[in-house]
Image (cartoon, grey):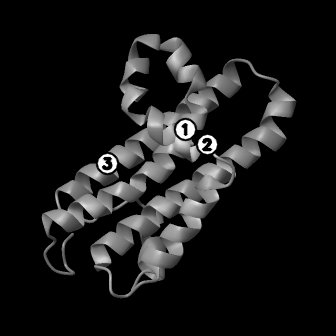
Amino acid sequence: MTWRGSTTPQDRIFACLPYLLPFLDGLGFSGPFFSQFPVLQPLLIPFVPLLQIYNFPFAGLIVFIALFALVVRNENINHFIRFNTMQAILIDIVLILCNLIVNFILQPVLQGGLILETLFNVIFLGTLVAVIYSVVQSALGRYAEIPTLSDAVYMQVR
């Protein structure tokens, strides 16, 4: 949906960049997937420098707060960019909640095994699909409509 006006190629590129945040957080769940499909590991090579920077202490939190304060709340930035930034932030919040639930509730109970590996694969692949869908829609100049999540984004970004 492009009801807020047209987007420039520069706006489309800037709208795609925030989706690196949930992608990098989603890679924390990718261990079982890449152990089952090691032939796909070379696909991560371009992201290694970003992962090294992102693994510094509190780097994720700093990027998270900076995106929210400097992009989402800045009325001077195009609505398209602010919408996609907020959607990336909300996907990241969902991943953080999944990480907390897995680490503090499920992992001590299940202690590894097939169920936990399946859960990791579902979370990773779900994140990957959401990020790829959102990036493709943003690159095309459309608003990526993810059910429930996009409604929450519309309430935050005016």
- Residue 25 is situated, as x and y percent measured from the top left of the image, at 56, 45
Q: Secondary structure at mark 3?
A: helix
Q: Callout 2, which amino acid? A: Asn
Three-letter amino acid code at the position of disc 1: Gln
Counting from the top left corner in percent of width and height, residue 131 is at: 39, 48
- Residue at 44% across / 64% down in the picture? 87
Inter-mark Cα distance, 1 to 2: 5 Å
Identify which residue is drawn at 27% across, 65% down: 143
Secondary structure type for disc 1? helix
Residue corresponding to mark 3: 133
Q: Is residue 145 left or right of residue 123?
A: left
Classify 144 as above or below 158: above
Observer-nearest residue: 7 or 63?
63
Asked whether the viewer can see residue 2, the reply is yes
Q: Of helix, strand and loop, which one carries label 2? A: loop
Residue displayed at 52% across by 36% down: 124
Res 71 quadrant in image: bottom left
